[in-house]
Amino acid sequence: MKKMILAAAVFAALSTSASAQQAAAAETPEHSFTGNLTLASDYRFRGISQTFGKPTLQGGFDYAHSSGFYAGNWNSNVSGVQYPGGASLEMDFYAGYKFTPVEDLTADIGVLYYYYPGSTIGTTGEKFDNTEIYIGATYKWFSAKYSHGVTDFFGLNSTTGFAPRGDSKGSGYLDLAANFEIAEKTTLSFHVGHQKVRHYGELDYTDYKVGVARDFGFATLGLAVIGTNADEAFYTATNGSKSRDLGKTTAVLSLSKTF
């Protein structure tokens, strides 16, 4: 009788474990697709305005596999002053792999291609298009990511640069961020990053961001203060008689939705 009771208990435990595993598997679909849409008062990339300080409409979609593989596309309008001769559009294409080596730690490796249809740098014919590989990790509320350029830094080289110092391949960007839930559906975020441009040290700078976002269900409303210590002499764009310091500290208001 005791052996029968023990066997029944073991069988029940195994059955419960199997059911839990099946339930967990059911919660994580093999394939998932999501989309996103954002309206913001400015498009800041690594602290630098890409829209000459004007509003932006952005959106994209993502695919994720239960194995950890993912791929996606993201798009935004950009300034024709900064990216002349084209569609005033940035299209990003990326793919990567995420995995969890230990509990609460997620690692991420991938590649990202920035594409600016039709835009060229002055009369050189060189394109702004840029490719980076990246590696990152997230532990609970903290994340770190490093992006390494495998092409010239948005077209910067001896032909297009302000000084003939060769190419800018190997430029890198370090991104450190922290996110805290300070109230229900409300997140406080901090970010600091450093951009290093190979062979063109004058363009190196550090950027920062402090923001708060609230999920209202229909959309997420965000407000962030973003700034840099970028040298104004190299990060100023001019449109006719109007000039703008693209790295100047500013507040950015955004409304976004993921679906």
Image (cartoon, rainbow, N blue to C red):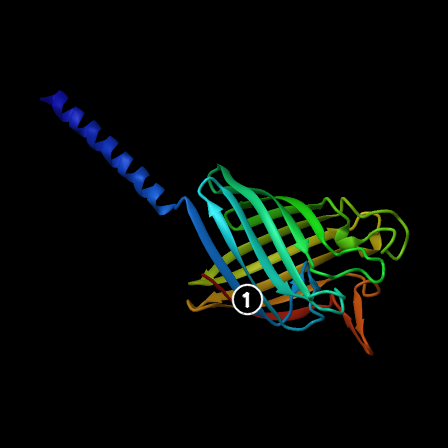
Above or below for 253 versus 61: below
Crowding at mark 1 (Cα within 10 Å: few <14, some 14-19, many 20+): some
The image position of residue 199, as x and y in percent, is 84, 48
Q: Nearer the viewer, residue 208 or 253?
A: 253
Q: Quadrant of the C terminus?
A: bottom left
Above or below for 117 versus 29: below
Residue 23, by quadrant, is: top left
Mark 1: which secondary structure?
Answer: strand
Residue name at image x 57 percent, y 48 percent = 143
**In the current view of this chain or complex, which residue is farthest to the left?**
1
Residue name at image x 54 percent, y 46 percent = 138
Residue name at image x 86 percent, y 55 percent = 161
The image position of residue 188, as x and y in percent, is 53, 61
Above or below for 35 versus 251: above
Q: How many marks?
A: 1
User: What residue sits right under mark 1 in the picture?
Assistant: 38
Q: Quadrant of the N terminus?
A: top left
**In the current view of this chain or complex, which residue is farthest to the right?**
164
The image position of residue 44, as x and y in percent, is 66, 64
User: On the rendered structure, is 116 left or right of 237?
Assistant: left
Residue name at image x 16 percent, y 28 percent = 8
The image position of residue 168, as x and y in percent, is 80, 48
Q: Amino acid at mark 1?
A: Thr
